[in-house]
Image: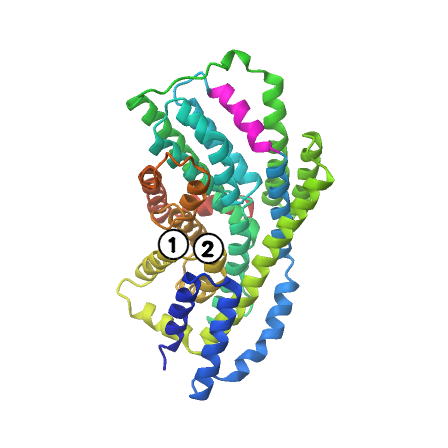
């Protein structure tokens, strides 16, 4: 009966593959296994008495309040056509250089990631706006689709990312739990702000790698790539109008968090208000858009919290069935200790990224494995960034990467799916190299948080 917890995990993955709603799949599978195990005396029903306090804690969590505010900010900026203005201006700025359009796509993707934090929206937006232009300018289909998918997933790692907000909250709870199990009743804490600071350098390294690769490709394989014929029409005033407002908003939001002037939730409120100002300046603030933004925000927020509620029940039953002890025993028996355990977890998370979204992985898998890894003296910030980059990589990996599906949905039918798959391979290699670099030099993650929060 000790493997019943693992069987429950396998079953919930199969149920999700059948297309059932995530939250109900998690909660329903957990309740069925709890009922069956109770009949055989393998589950203590008193575990479920902890549910009310767990749900109250979820609804009373001030950190999670940042989620609807950041979603609102990103949705407003998407409706305000910020991306279109940015791409047009950046293309005119860099269009005089060979490969300039690819650099523009990367930089705009980075800015969108830092302002919206929504991977799907970024991939779709960039696919609609830049892919036809890149093909028209003579860029290879593989390279064009690859750079768009890769830059679209930057919203996973570049703060203020919604993924990092959720991951930071889960890791904070896991870190405290790990310390309590080790007998430390005055545990240290980590915050979402710490995770944001830890993600800055890896995110910038990834952007730099994309840009260097773009320059190398266009120099070594120029093909039919043409430069822009619009460089003489570059207007500095238009460039500043397109670039400065989102930059100021990013600095206000991220700077206030990293500087310790505001919590992520307070900064998210500033960002939401600032996005409305930008929408008003762009003439996009009207009742129709506002209604669409609020409806979208409500749907996404409801989905996140409903999954969190279902995942909370799932993890409670998983622990009640002895799953946590089973995994801990497995990790302790691995040769190589923490290194082997970390490698196994990263491989499992990477594979789960094919079938589960980052929200399900964050709420279901991380609470199970993180306390065990943290008890092995693994740095929680380093662990969080490694998981975030790993998930970003799995979202790019064929044949199930979510970013590939997003782009396939908006790309021209003449572009074959195989070309999209081949196009992302160099960027997957770059992300794997980043993971290797972070493994060798954890200071790339921990240096900035240590400087900001000594």
Report the magenta residues as a range. 81-94
Instruction: Answer left or right for 263 relative to 90.
Output: right
- Residue at point 49%, 68% (across, down): 26
Front residue (pair 262, 48): 48
| SS category of the residue bearing label 2 | loop
CA–CA distance between discs 1 and 2?
8 Å
The quadrant the N terminus occupies is: bottom left
- Secondary structure category for the residue under label 1: loop
Q: Is residue 269 magenta?
A: no
The circle on residue 357 is 2
What is the x, y in percent for residue 113?
A: 52, 40
Q: Name the foreground residue: 93 vs 85.
A: 85
Is residue 183 visible in the rendered structure shown here? no
The answer to which quarter of the image holds residue 78 is top right
Mark 2 is surrounded, within 10 Å at the Cα level, by few (under 14), some (14 to 19) or many (20 or more) other residues, namely some
Image coordinates of residue 145 in percent, x first then y, are: 39, 35
Residue 278: % across, % down? 67, 34
Q: Label 1, on which residue?
A: 354
**Residue at the limit of the structure toward the left, as seen here:** 335
Considering every residue shown, the one lying at the far front of the view is 413
**Left or right: 119 as drawn, with respect to 69:** left
Q: Position of residue 265 (x, y in %)?
A: 64, 51
* Membership of 86 in magenta stretch: yes
Is 367 drawn above or below residue 108 in the view shown? Answer: below
What type of secondary structure mainly makes up the magenta span?
helix
Q: How many marks?
A: 2
> Do the residues bearing badges 1 and 2 touch, measured as CB atoms within 8 Å?
no
- Neighbour tally class for label 1: few under 14, some 14-19, many 20 plus, Cα within 10 Å: some
Seen at 33% across and 26% down, the residue is: 216
């Amino acid at each position: 009966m000790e493997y019943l917890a693992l069987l429950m995990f396998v079953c919930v993955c199969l149920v999700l593959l059948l297309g059932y709603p995530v939250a109900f799949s998690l909660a329903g599978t957990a309740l069925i296994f709890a009922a069956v195990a109770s009949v055989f005396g393998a589950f203590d029903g008193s575990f479920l008495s902890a549910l009310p306090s767990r749900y109250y804690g979820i609804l009373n969590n001030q950190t999670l309040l940042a989620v609807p505010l950041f979603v609102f900010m990103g949705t407003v900026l998407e409706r305000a056509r910020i991306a279109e203005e940015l791409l047009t201006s950046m293309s005119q700025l860099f269009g005089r250089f060979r490969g300039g359009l690819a650099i523009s796509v990367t930089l705009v993707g980075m800015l969108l990631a830092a302002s919206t934090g929504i991977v799907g929206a970024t991939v779709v937006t960039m696919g609609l706006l830049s892919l036809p232009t890149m093909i028209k300018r003579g860029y290879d289909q593989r390279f064009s689709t690859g750079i768009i998918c890769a830059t679209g997933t930057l919203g996973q790692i570049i703060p203020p990312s919604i993924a990092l907000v959720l991951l930071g909250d889960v890791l904070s709870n896991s870190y405290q739990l790990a310390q309590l199990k080790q007998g430390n009743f005055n545990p240290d804490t980590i915050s979402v702000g710490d995770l944001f600071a830890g993600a800055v350098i890896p995110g910038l390294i990834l952007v730099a790698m994309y840009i260097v690769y773009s320059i190398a490709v266009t120099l070594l394989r120029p093909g039919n790539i043409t430069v822009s014929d619009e460089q003489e029409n570059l207007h500095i005033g238009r460039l500043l109008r397109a670039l400065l407002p989102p930059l100021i908003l990013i600095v206000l939001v991220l700077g206030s968090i990293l500087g310790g002037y505001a919590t992520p939730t307070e900064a998210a409120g500033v960002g939401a208000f600032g996005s409305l100002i930008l929408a008003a300046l762009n003439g996009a603030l009207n009742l129709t858009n506002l209604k669409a933004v609020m409806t979208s925000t409500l749907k996404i927020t409801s989905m996140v919290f409903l999954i969190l509620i279902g995942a909370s029940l799932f993890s409670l039953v998983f622990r009640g069935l002895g799953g946590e002890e089973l995994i801990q025993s497995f990790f302790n028996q691995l040769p190589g200790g923490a290194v082997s355990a970390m490698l196994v977890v990263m491989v499992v998370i990477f594979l789960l990224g094919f079938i589960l979204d980052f929200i399900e992985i964050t709420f279901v898998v991380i609470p199970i494995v993180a306390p065990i890894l943290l008890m092995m003296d693994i740095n929680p910030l380093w662990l969080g960034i490694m998981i975030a980059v790993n998930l970003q990589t799995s979202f790019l990996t064929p044949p199930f990467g979510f970013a590939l599906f997003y782009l396939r949905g908006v790309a021209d039918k003449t572009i074959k799916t195989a070309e999209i798959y081949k196009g992302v391979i160099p960027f997957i290699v770059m992300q794997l190299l980043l993971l290797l670099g972070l493994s060798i030099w954890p200071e790339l993650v921990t240096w900035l948080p240590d400087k900001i929060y000594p």
